[in-house]
Image (tube, rainbow, N blue to C red):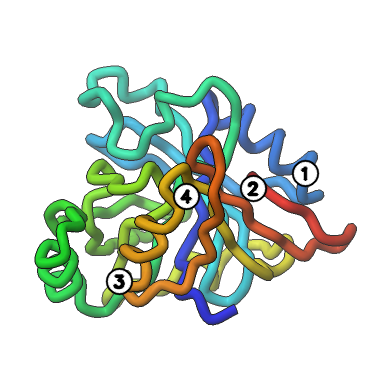
Amino acid sequence: MNLPVDHLIYAAPTLERGMGQIEALLGARPVYGGQHLGYGTHNALLGLGPDVYLEVIAPDPAQPEAPRPLWIAADAVTEPRLICWAAKSADLDALVGKAHRHGIELGKVTAGSRARPDGQMLSWRLTDPRANPAVGIIPFFIDWGDSAHPAQELPGVGALLSLEAQHPEADRVQSHLRLLGLALPVYPGPQPALLARIRTRGGEVVLK
């Protein structure tokens, strides 16, 4: 797959519920990643290859004061589901400028960090997930800089084979993705949706 997927984001009302659903679907339990301090979320992770991973994300009950809506819309789901994805980019500022010139708003580039359970800090720069120009189908973009990619230290559940999407305005969204250099197939559908095909030890699974 030539799509520069960094990670898939699977949101759930609670982290325990999301982890349990992924374990039932993929046959492996995600490992706790950490808190996004100040952002109101926490996560658990599984590897989908050497530089791709699955992130289960949920509101963090230890951060009730975090601004709402949350930066990644885990507080908007009532059932666990795949809500968005992140793509790799080594030049976020240039990409945001190019997108803006074509009427695609990716938001500001900001820095983020979280502590792993072993105390090691991960840091990154990313475009704003809250911009969400096509309800999760156009990704936000991330650059890990000097941090090791999280997938390198994660237990693997298998491999991401393909990613595709549905959207009511499929042609427009497909055009915007191409302008951003992304060959994500988008098909007409009643509402935005992502479908990831994953090879696991038990066979192929479609995560949505």
**Residue 21 rendering spot, x and y as whole percentages:** 71, 35
How packed mark 2 is, by other alpha carbons closer than 10 Å (few <14, some 14-19, many 20 or more), is many
Nearest to viewer (mark 1 / mark 2): 1
User: Do labels 2 and 4 touch, CB within 8 Å?
Assistant: no
Q: Amino acid at mark 3?
A: Leu
Label 1: element kind: helix
Residue plotted at (79% across, 39% down): 24
**Residue indicated by mark 2:** 30
**Residue indicated by mark 1:** 25
Residue in the foreground of this view, choosing between 161 and 7: 161
In the picture, measured across the screen, residue 80 lies left or right of residue 191, that is right
Label 4: element kind: loop
> In the picture, residue 131 is in which quadrant?
top left
User: Do labels 1 and 4 touch, CB within 8 Å?
Assistant: no
Residue plotted at (77% across, 44% down): 25
Q: Is residue 187 above or below residue 17?
A: below
Label 2: element kind: loop
Marked residue nearer the N-terminal end (2 or 3): 2
Label 3: element kind: loop
Mark 4–mark 3 distance (CA, rounded to whole Å): 35 Å
**Residue 177 rendering spot, x and y as whole percentages:** 36, 66
**Residue 174 rendering spot, x and y as whole percentages:** 41, 62
In the picture, measured across the screen, residue 60 lies left or right of residue 142, that is right
**Residue indicated by mark 3:** 180
Mark 1–mark 2 distance (CA, rounded to whole Å): 12 Å
Mark 2–mark 4 distance (CA, rounded to whole Å): 13 Å
How packed mark 4 is, by other alpha carbons closer than 10 Å (few <14, some 14-19, many 20 or more), is few
How packed mark 1 is, by other alpha carbons closer than 10 Å (few <14, some 14-19, many 20 or more), is some
